[in-house]
Image (cartoon, rainbow, N blue to C red):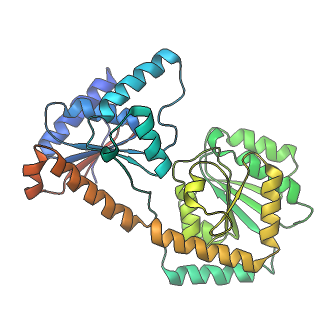
Amino acid sequence: MPVIQPLGGPAPLLRAVLTLRRVVREEKIDVVHAHMSDSAILVALALAGTGIPFVVTHHSNRLLPKERWAKHLLRRISSAWALRRAAFNIGVTPNVADRLKEEFSLPSGSVIHIPNGVNIPPQEAVDAAQISRLESEAGVPWPRITTLGRLAPVKRQDIAIDAIHHLREALPHIQLRILGEGPLMQELAEQIELRQLSTFVDLAGPTDNVASALCDTDIYVSTSSYEGLPVAVLEAMSWCLPVVATEVPGHRDVIHNGVDGCLVPFDDPQALAQQILRLCRSSTERRELGSAARDRAVRDFSDKAMADSYCETYLAALERNTRGSRASRSFRGKFSILTPTGRTRRR
């Protein structure tokens, strides 16, 4: 998949618009797929007058960033202008889709819900991981807790660290592994040192092998203050892991509390610790939650289901468009993706 990065140099936004317009013309793109509202603005400007449809995926319950009122007003007006020109606005959760309709007064027919999907590991690999987890219960360290995500304020890994502080006497061999990198790396390292948890918490940095990390995990936790649709949680569920997550938007869209995972109050390390301890004391509950979690991931959040839904959406966008009603009969399957970083990908 070729990647073009038009931002940089003088007038980067104008450069991005002109570059995208050129790529769409030269590559004879049928549909453009933007991600988040800023990319939608660039796409709407680039496609003005071309008759080429575009769709926009929104990944967060926060549709616009927090900023000063004048800049926020300008962004809201320009975003509303762009989103109303999209063939479809796609929310990764029902809540995101509802917020789109409410905040931008978008017609119901132009707003749809397509959940993120993850690669579902084969059952044989999951079974092998389950056997490994059973064998690890007699060893040290146990239990092995993992959380994965950018080390940023929204992810609130500090809550997980404080929960381990509450658990270290009841579970003297507990191990928390924090995977990821970001601006809070030093702050979290200082918290671990202050709490004297260096033997209990591993600030492990990023990983290129998420599957291996999840195979070496007994319980997965997510402590975010909010989510769009949490891909890391879905990956953990697909590996048959019991998940404990904060009861916030995003997590609530994925986990049915007590059925295929556990939800705990946000910003409550003690509640998180109590739920982890409860799961550690019941291998039956861990297995049942993990099995139900995988069933839900397979049923509702596979990457194949997501890809099929997006292909249907691209075709529907062409059908809706006056130009697309003709182009859909000779659809070449070529589309362009514009991400919030300004990178254009052609397929």
Q: Quadrant of the C terminus?
A: bottom left
Instruction: Using the image, determine if residue 319 lies above or below residue 71.
Output: below
The reply, left or right, for residue 105 in relation to residue 311 is: right
Instruction: Using the image, determine if residue 231 lies above or below residue 138.
Output: above
Q: Is residue 198 visible?
A: no
The reply, left or right, for residue 84 in relation to residue 151 is: left
Residue 9 falls in image quadrant:
top left
Residue extending furthest front?
108
The residue that appears at 76% across and 79% down in the rendered structure is 283
- State the image coordinates of residue 31 (x, y, percent, origin top left): 21, 47
Residue extending furthest top?
70
Instruction: Using the image, determine if residue 233 lies above or below residue 55.
Output: below
The residue that appears at 10% across and 44% down in the rendered structure is 323
- State the image coordinates of residue 135 (x, y, percent, origin top left): 73, 83
The residue that appears at 68% across and 51% down in the rendered structure is 223
The reply, left or right, for residue 143 in relation to residue 9 is: right
The residue that appears at 20% across and 34% down in the rendered structure is 47
- State the image coordinates of residue 346 (x, y, percent, origin top left): 25, 49
Near-viewer residue (200 or 70) = 70
- State the image coordinates of residue 306 (x, y, percent, origin top left): 37, 61
Instruction: Using the image, determine if residue 2 lies above or below residue 63.
Output: below
Q: Is residue 52 visible?
A: yes
